[in-house]
Amino acid sequence: MDIKAGIIGVGSYVPENIVTNFDLEKIMDTSDEWIRTRTGISERRKVAEGEATSDTASKAALKALECAKLEPKDVDMIILATITPDSPLPSTACIVQENIGAVNAAAFDLAAACSGFLYAMNIAKRFVESGAYKNVLIIGAETLSSVINYDDRSTAVLFGDGAGAAVISAVENGGILSITNGADGSGKDYLKIPAGGSRIKAGEESVRNKLHTVQMAGNDVFKFAVRKMADESVKAVEAANLTLEDIDFLIPHQANIRIIDSSAKRLKLEKDKVYVNLTRYGNMSSASVPVAMDEAFREGKLKKGDKVVLVGFGGGLTWGASVVEWSI
């Protein structure tokens, strides 16, 4: 009998510290109105002093395991999507493994920016359906406050910290009906953190020139996102052998309200069928989709049997989309 992978548990964590648009007004040339009208963001979260990606990821992971009614020892693989690891070595996934006591789990990090969670979900689906692993814990976690340049108002206002997680296991009904991932390396310069790797090593000059912070060609990313979010969502629906009329809910990457509205319109979904928490959290990169998914579930917006589209895009350039039949 064929194994069908699905989501059996979800969880999320956002830091307590809230940074409002009015807070940003005090430290840079911007305004609440300027930010809200261009992005839809009113506030975002920031980790406490000494708090890192492994900390937020571990908290989200434990909530997902509780939701799935599993113990940490039941997890046999951890995949952590992040562009802000605790450090280059060891992987942040290994730190999470120790933190939560998942003593039987393999663990590794994955870097696909804002598409990272959907990349992780694709890998987890393959591992579970091959029979190689039983319970795969996937996490999207970011500490983007650590890579923000507050002299660049076009990027500094966008990003927030947080973590979301899901447990992928075999399900009897529903599951991950389709999932697609893609990339276009010709857009590598549209969204990047230039230094800190083997190309531009960390040093006095790279720090002084703020090459360890996010740089973005906003207009290019916006045009790419508007096209890809809608196109990939439609592709995922078709790959699941469904029509747009079959879709009950959309959980998009939370980057910009105009991009979200454009995708919803293409999928012919009313606003009450689209989950948006962008106004409260900003763009949390790989954490955006899993945090939104967890909140939508806990608010009762996702019900067993619902056909849900998950979609994201990010630096690389990368993208991913999935149709999930909700099984919790």
Image: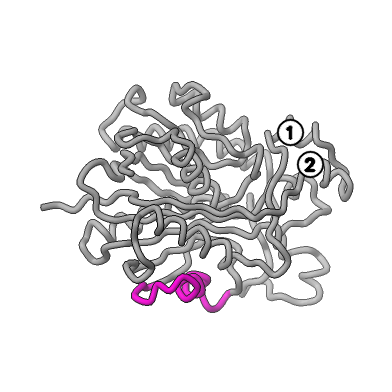
Question: x, y percentage for residue 121?
Answer: 38, 53
Question: x, y percentage for residue 89?
Answer: 55, 78
Identify the residue at horizontal 47%, vertical 27% (top origin): 273
The amino acid pointed to by label 1 is: Arg
User: Can residue 226 be found in the magenta stretch?
Assistant: no
Q: Quadrant of residue 328?
A: top left
Identify the residue at horizontal 86%, vertical 43% (top origin): 25
Q: Which mark is residue 36?
A: 1
Q: Residues within 10 Å of mark 1 (few under 14, many from 20)?
A: some
Of 158 and 294, nearer the camera is 294
Residue 186 visible, this orientation: no
Identify the residue at horizontal 57%, vertical 50% (top origin): 187
Question: x, y percentage for residue 48?
Answer: 71, 62
Question: x, y percentage for residue 196?
Answer: 66, 71
Residue 84 visible, this orientation: yes
The amino acid pointed to by label 2 is: Asn
The span from disc 1 to disc 2 (Cα, nearest Å) is 8 Å
Q: Which residue is mark 2?
A: 21
**Upstream in sequence: badge 1 or badge 2:** 2
Q: Residue furthest left?
A: 1
Please report the bounds of the magenta region as a residue range: 88-106
User: Can residue 99 be found in the magenta stretch?
Assistant: yes
Identify the residue at horizontal 50%, vertical 23% (top origin): 265
Whether label 1 touches label 2, CB < 8 Å: yes
Taking 277 as reference, is 147 left or right?
Answer: right
Of 157 and 151, nearer the camera is 157
